[in-house]
Amino acid sequence: MSIVITGATGTVGRHVLQQLSKRGAEVRAFVRDAKKTTIPAGVTVVQGDLLDVDTLRTAFSGASTLFLLNAVVPDEFTQALITLNLARESGVDRVVYLSVIHSDLYANVPHFAGKFGVERAIERMGFSATILRPAYFMDNDITIKDVVLRYGVYPMPIGGKGLAMIDARDIGEIAAIELVRREQATGTLPLERINLVGPDALTGADIAAIWSDVTGRSIAYGGDDTAGFEQNLRKVMPNWMAFDMRLMSDRFLSDGMIPESGDLERLTALLGRPLRSYRSFASEIAATDSAGSAPPQQKGSPS
């Protein structure tokens, strides 16, 4: 029986795919464009999208398990429901779903509320499921590394409550472990929710201090201006998505993303090793990016 992976070439999905391939699992990668990435040998590729009913039926034929990851798009909830219904129709009864931590708490944030709706659908539809709830991805900060390394500012408005950021490689490995466990189970396993968090709950000032240490330069925290953050995001993404991200950032400031009791111990036991730290993540970027060692001499900061 096969494991179907949606979002198989993205930030998390590619790590899930690699980890499953290492474990010898029979995998089908459901991708929008097979030409845009390298798929591990032995993986079956099905090209389509999560509104393509016929192609989804093809992907699910003879499969047993689904890793459901769908992007933040206006019809994210509809895509997920169509995918889940077609999976169940095809006899797929085991699911690992990538949701988000505090999906039930951040009720006003569109993509959080949508993911919580998917969680409830998975539960009500009777799947044997693991719902993974990751905190903020460290890997999101790759998109702003040039601002940090060239201009000396950490610009993400994450506030002072603390975010337990997690590395996408750890998410991918945990997802693969859960997929294999579900796929190989001889009976129906109960539904579980697992918070995916990093080892440290970091504030904006904490992260700026880490970047200062690993670069040997003074890196400042850019502050809590979520309105300005939204305006900057509007230059690179649709307006509705920029507003969604602003609403999320507002909740970072008011609530943070803090692990619950036992989260870290559970994840460490699953992986059999410590979780990757933000300091390790930042050190890797600083060591490999030439901008980290030779920043251009410029005045001011990016708009």
Image (cartoon, rainbow, N blue to C red):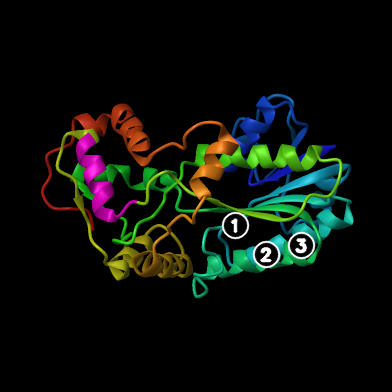
For marks 3 and 1, the one nearer the N-term is 3
Residue at label 2? 118
Residue at label 1? 99
Residue at label 3? 82
Q: Nearer the viewer, mark 3 or mark 2?
A: 2
Q: Are marks 3 and 2 in contact (CB under 8 Å)?
A: no
For marks 2 and 1, the one nearer the N-term is 1
Q: Residues within 10 Å of mark 3 (few under 14, many from 20)?
A: some
Task: Judge whether 60 appears above or below 99 on screen.
Answer: above
Rendering quarter of residue 247: bottom left
Q: Residues within 10 Å of mark 1 (few under 14, many from 20)?
A: many
For marks 3 and 2, the one nearer the N-term is 3
Would residue 228 appear left or right of 173 to someone viewing this image?
Answer: left
Question: What main secondary structure does the magenta stretch of the protein show?
Answer: helix
Q: Which residues are magenta?
A: 202-213
Residue type pointed to by label 3: Ile
Residue at horizontal 50%, vertical 41%? 168
Q: Residues within 10 Å of mark 2 (few under 14, many from 20)?
A: many
Rendering quarter of residue 64: top right
